[in-house]
Amino acid sequence: MITCAAPAPPSGQVQLGHGSGGKLSAALVRDHFLPELTNPVLRQLGDGAVVPVFQGEIAISTDTFVVNPIEFPGGNIGSLAVHGTLNDVAMMGAVPRFLTAGFVLEEGLDLAVLDRVIAAMAAAARAAGVPLVTGDTKVVERGKADGLYINTTGIGTLEGPCRPAPQRAASGDAVLVSGPIGTHGMAIMAAREGLGFEAEIESDSAALYPLVARLAGRFGGEVHVLRDPTRGGVASALNEIAAASHCGIVLEEDALPIRGPVAAACEMLGLDPLYVAGEGVMLAILPARHAEEAVAALRSLPLGAEAACIGRVVDEHPGMVVMRTGIGGTRVVDMLPGDQLPRIC
Amino acid sequence: MITCAAPAPPSGQVQLGHGSGGKLSAALVRDHFLPELTNPVLRQLGDGAVVPVFQGEIAISTDTFVVNPIEFPGGNIGSLAVHGTLNDVAMMGAVPRFLTAGFVLEEGLDLAVLDRVIAAMAAAARAAGVPLVTGDTKVVERGKADGLYINTTGIGTLEGPCRPAPQRAASGDAVLVSGPIGTHGMAIMAAREGLGFEAEIESDSAALYPLVARLAGRFGGEVHVLRDPTRGGVASALNEIAAASHCGIVLEEDALPIRGPVAAACEMLGLDPLYVAGEGVMLAILPARHAEEAVAALRSLPLGAEAACIGRVVDEHPGMVVMRTGIGGTRVVDMLPGDQLPRIC
């Protein structure tokens, strides 16, 4: 009664059988995932992982990555899936500790592409010092996914008094940014559209925890808000913070760090960089009296070399973000209703 | 310079803009996810969740669900995504505590379908007493996903001495099953193929933690292995356990509980129920002297009413599973190389 269909001949592509839970699945994990991602916890290959935690609170964040194209200047979906989720954990003031990964692979995906994605994932996790402790792989038929999608869930431990939250912005706070904005989104757009300026724009995808540690160590509980402006960019992130805190936010256009090629590409495509995602930059909101020292602290790390104070939190126009433009005017920076750039993460 | 494209006219379908991180995303979460899934942690709508943990160890498991069809007799992808991951946590001997969810939605998905999926997810989480604490939603273009995929990550706390693991099966142990096997897989096959016996087979998808609690409470550290035989069925699960424990396993064919309609459908399709997934059944391996009491403990719960002792762990043929058939013969129960039933979870 057993129907034991012969596997398709071995090839360099993902096959449906790789998702079966049988021998092919085991071979995929053994030959492609474990060599790069191995650590004592993952190596046990259970359906989950057991890890130690300290007493107290843990921070949890989950994100699915569907970026198109899978590979782009400055990274690929694997490194992005590590950075994106670890950054969400770091933005809660937590020390990122563990990572899980769930893959949806499309039948026919080149195993060479998968291997590059896994290698980038492993390198990003190693650099961040965070082990991938458990994972899962599913395969769907040709055409039913765009190469691959990756979900990552990150778990961090909350230590010390730093508890940033979107509702904690307060009048009198300064708004800092750790580096140039809009870089990741424009790198993806350039790669996707095959625009001529491809070589000039690399994604800024990076782990932000070292910047968080710098601020948390110095200002502790006075770090009111941390946020990485990914989907929807700085504009959407600040609108959410203004709404949650019932405060207004005033930005200074001239203070916003934007790389020249990013600004030029935005101009060419008619996009506002305020709405374009970065993946290696964060917003920090803390009392204005600490602004100068905080900018210096961020600048002491290479990732924060272009940190700047870009605005302040005010009592006026609660829930609203406005920008003072270079020529002295003021405009409202609203949330977009829908997409400016789909599938950039 | 802002290009603020007007959103597509409101409709009953998922739009690309629902994945933008802008106003449409916020509306999707507010109108479709929160009404069903709300709890104090999720309601904060941060990029993650902060939850308390006790000192000690936590168990983490992640799983992506790509079941086709999305809805089937006995459940849908939402209830399955809750049960599947909570069960993986429970199989580690942990008390399931928190759940995260990452959605990949296909543009054009009926919001009515999404609402039913979310409602089933919420009902399953409520019944299990486990809150969904954070989530994420992405939208991909029409044709780039099969309606929707859901990743869930579960976190549990390890309390008490019960630490089951695949490598802990020992010669002299009994192999128990908590109920009929192969039910979920055949329910999916029936729904997918539009076979005539649809009405008779409902998925057994269910949360197994109450069964685990019963065994852990009574036998503690003597519960050597727990495993839910999902993808690849009982045969694959026991092969993995035999390999990890360097023991042999002998099954008694006559002892295996299989519902009549499941056996008939398997027969008709030429499938071996030993390789067909269940989603509301578990294998438990513990010293044979406890077998009778353990079966009685499982049977004291409705979900375990058909629990049975189906085999034993032996020193002979390490790494291999064999079955003594009803007519007195013996056959090897190997792992399948690839797929018997793709995309059943």
Image: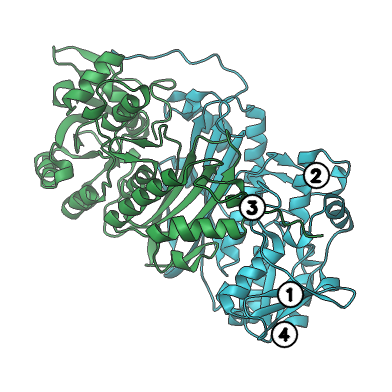
Chain colours: A green, B cyan
- Circle 2 sits in a helix, a strand or a loop, which is it? helix
Comparing marks 4 and 1, which lies closer to the viewer? Answer: 1
Residue neighbourhood size for the residue with mark 2, other residues' Cα within 10 Å, grouped as few (<14), some (14–19), many (≥20): many
Comparing marks 3 and 1, which lies closer to the viewer? Answer: 3
Q: CA distance from mark 2 to mark 1?
A: 29 Å
Label 4 is placed on what type of residue?
Answer: Ala
Residue situated in front as seen by the camera: B123 or A257? A257
Is residue A299 toward the left or the right of residue A12 in the image?
A: left
Please name the residue shown 36% across and 51% down the image. A119
Residue B187 seen in render: yes
Q: CA distance from mark 2 to mark 3?
A: 24 Å
| A64 up-or-down from A154: above or below | above
Q: Position of residue B62 (x, y in %)?
A: 52, 54
Disc 2 target residue: B190
Whether labels 2 and 3 share one chain: no
Q: Position of residue B274 (x, y in %)?
A: 75, 63
Is residue B30 toward the left or the right of residue B175 in the image?
A: left
- Circle 4 sits in a helix, a strand or a loop, which is it? helix
Disc 3 target residue: A7
Residue neighbourhood size for the residue with mark 4, other residues' Cα within 10 Å, grouped as few (<14), some (14–19), many (≥20): some
Of label 2 and label 1, which has the lower sequence position? Answer: 2
Residue situated in front as seen by the camera: B36 or A41? A41
Residue A39: image quadrant is bottom left
Label 3 is placed on what type of residue?
Answer: Pro
Mark 3 touches mark 1? (CB < 8 Å): no
Disc 1 target residue: B322
Residue B240: image quadrant is bottom right
Disc 4 target residue: B288
Mark 4 touches mark 3? (CB < 8 Å): no
